[in-house]
Image (cartoon, rainbow, N blue to C red):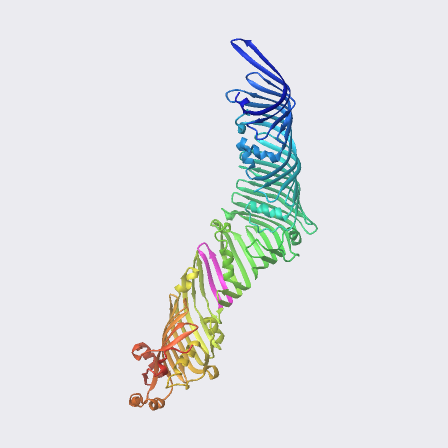
Amino acid sequence: LQEIAQIKQLEGRAQWALVLGETLNAIKVRASARDIRLVALYGRIPFPLSIDGGDSSYDGEKLSFQNLKGKVGRSNFAGLEAEIKLKKEPYIEIQSGECSIMLDELRSYASLGEALKKVLRDVTSLKGVVHLSRMRMKGPLNRPKDWHFETAGDWQGLSLETHVVPGTLTSPKGKFRADPKTITFSDVQGHVLNAFIHVSGRLSNYLDELDRVELDIDGKVTPGEIRWLLDSLKVKREIPIRSSLSFSRAHLSWRRKGDTSFRGELMVERGPKIYLDLVQKLGQLKVDPLTLRDESSNCSIMLDLKDGALKVEFSGELSERTLDKIFSGYQFQNGRLKGDFRATLVIDQPIRSTVQGRLEADELSFPWQFRKPLEIEHISLRGEGNRISVGEARFSWGGMALALSGTGSFSEKGVLMDIDLSTDQVDLDQIRESFQKEKNGKDAQDSSKFKVEGTVRFKANSFRYGRFNWEPLWANITIDPDGVEAKIEEAKLCGISTPGLVKMMGQELSFDIHPLFKGREFKQTASCLLDHEIQMTGDLDLKGRVFARGQPQDLLHSLKGDLELRATDGRIYYAVVLFRILEFINITEIYRGSLPNLKKEGLPYKLISLKGSFHNGKLIIKEATLDGKTLEMVAKGELDLVNQQMKLTVLVAPLKTVDRIIKLIPLVREILAGTLVSIPLDVHGSLKDPKVTYLSPLAIGNELVEMMKRTLRLPFKLFEPLIPGKKEESPP
């Protein structure tokens, strides 16, 4: 009676029969109806129910239907045999029948069951017709999710739009069979974007959490669908597919807690024929084989990664012309890889690794696999047991041309190498930047069980780091578990020889360098080293020791060491500190216009000397002297190399007799007669743009005075000059 109460607005006709039987104490009601023609609203169905033929019966315990024909909304059914058992919990059973379901009405039924709601939750549009040629179903009427069913049929004109797949998925036709656990389908034709597939297969547990897929696939996909698929699988799109792929006799198998496999033939549009057999299991990835064949290539590749061991085999010949038909970005077009080569790498026990065979490559390019484009001009490999030899290798990476030869062998800890590596130029900042981008990514995995050790004899015609450029740089590099140590045999920085030792231990870098220079015409050396213009001549003798230890970005702060410099018999045409000092004292009443013009005639000198030490990023100048024909100068102070600032105390003694002074200042004639004048100055500010002010003689320490005595070897007086307008700084 509860189910009958769900019927509303019943209209129509039928041939009814009512039978009251059994005893008066237990009257049983039987009713039957034939040739039913009616329209009604049934509370559990969202559309009007129309019956156009069929019979029905009721015996107090169940409601039965025979050969019903009718419509629900725009969907229709025929030959329906069903009964509803009117127990405490009503139970429905459909024995047979056919129906056609309009899919655009299906979303209205989602409220009848969580399973249907789950299937349709990402669907934004659904159109087409499903024909059920077989239909069996039973279960609690009020709990559709517990229904058991068996059905078979086909569809036509399917059109589907979802949040998952871009564009509209269309399928002109397809056949299927389904029960609550499994759906199988065959002869399915589908289109999405520009792809076409013809597929048959089976999905298991599809109404809950899909746990198995078996598909037989033929079809064609374009690069657009491949890009979408890679993005959906969260695979890096570093593989730029350029051509459409056709599948033939392909089979895909997937299990949630088991294997994934793909086997089939792929045909690249205007490209090679590929056969791929791939299996991925828990802890194993195996490709056996991958073959490529066209007019340029014929090769077979095997790969097996399992339990920390990688097996790779290559045999045949692979042309870059073939790869270019599949991927974009190749440069040479004439590249070729050929040989018969096998390798087994055991990550946990490197000593068990082996290589065998020969492999040669010419003019191959790898545009996206190694952070920057790698172009191989030529490489020849030979494997013999646990040893691999590189007879000759010429290649470029990120614009650097390199040549390599040597050997590598497997040891208890990893690979022990002994190689020669040379290049025309290296930019260390570019290399560090390339690897820095991925240091926290998947490429930064723990490789502690497979170490690279050995010796690299390295030669570079140019080695750049920051603004400094060594030309050349030769080093013997030793790599061991503790880090990397480079013994620099020959290196010239701004013409200065800088042999020494550089170490990298973890994230810490240290160096101990012994700069040395002897020679004339050091104008380029001085300008290069100080990063601003200096024009001078003379013989330079420079030696010292510079060392530091710390994080690469903090090395300048930890700089320590000593430096000595002597320059003799030359002439200074431009040096910013000297230029500003002469510019300043030239405006005094005593020396106005009497000092040399640097740019025109230069300042001749006999000796320039400097003794200093490095401490925490500063060059502490203990003693600096200039012994010139027209000028003597001593100085001490510091140059802040981190902040590019200076703070110097300077004594300047222009070599003039006191006659001009006496004439200008008669009152000091008796005091200064027969002596020279030394002017105390303060030089401070930017290394490239220092400022000059005068100091009181009382501010000069004895140490600087003694330096001036040794330099002049004549009596002198500290003198505070008269400056017009009491100007304290040099003109800008």
| Side of 471 relative to 722 (left or right) | right
Q: Is residue 504 left or right of residue 224?
A: left
Asked whether the viewer can see residue 138, the reply is no
Query: Based on the displayed image, in which of its 4 quarters is residue 632 positioned?
Result: bottom left
Establish if 517 lies above or below 301.
below
Report if residue 377 lies within the magenta region. no
User: Based on the displayed image, in which of its 4 quarters is residue 710 positioned?
Assistant: bottom left
Residue 483 in the image, given as x and y percentages of width and height: 45, 56
- Residue 134's x, y, as percent? 64, 27
Q: How many marks?
A: 0
Quick one: which residue is furthest to the right in this view?
A: 295
Q: Nearer the viewer, residue 229 or 540?
A: 229
> Dividing the picture into quarters, in which one does residue 693 lie?
bottom left
Q: Examine the rendered structure and indicate whether residue 669 appears above or below residue 375.
A: below
64 is higher (above) or lower (below) than 482: above
Image location of residue 126, percent across then percent down:
61, 38
Along the line of sight, the residue nearer the viewer: 635 or 452: 635
Residue range (magenta): 471-491
* Vertical side of 594 occupied by 564: above or below: above
Give the main secondary structure of the magenta stretch.
Answer: strand
The percent coordinates of residue 543 (x first, y second) are 42, 72
Can residue 212 be spotted in the picture?
yes
Q: Determine the residue positioned at 48% across, 67% down.
A: 468
Using the image as rendered, state which of residue 710 and residue 378 is in the foreground. 710
Q: Quadrant for the C terminus, please.
A: bottom left
- The foreground one among 728 and 371 is 728
Q: Is residue 473 magenta?
A: yes
Q: Residue at x 62, y 48 (%)?
A: 224
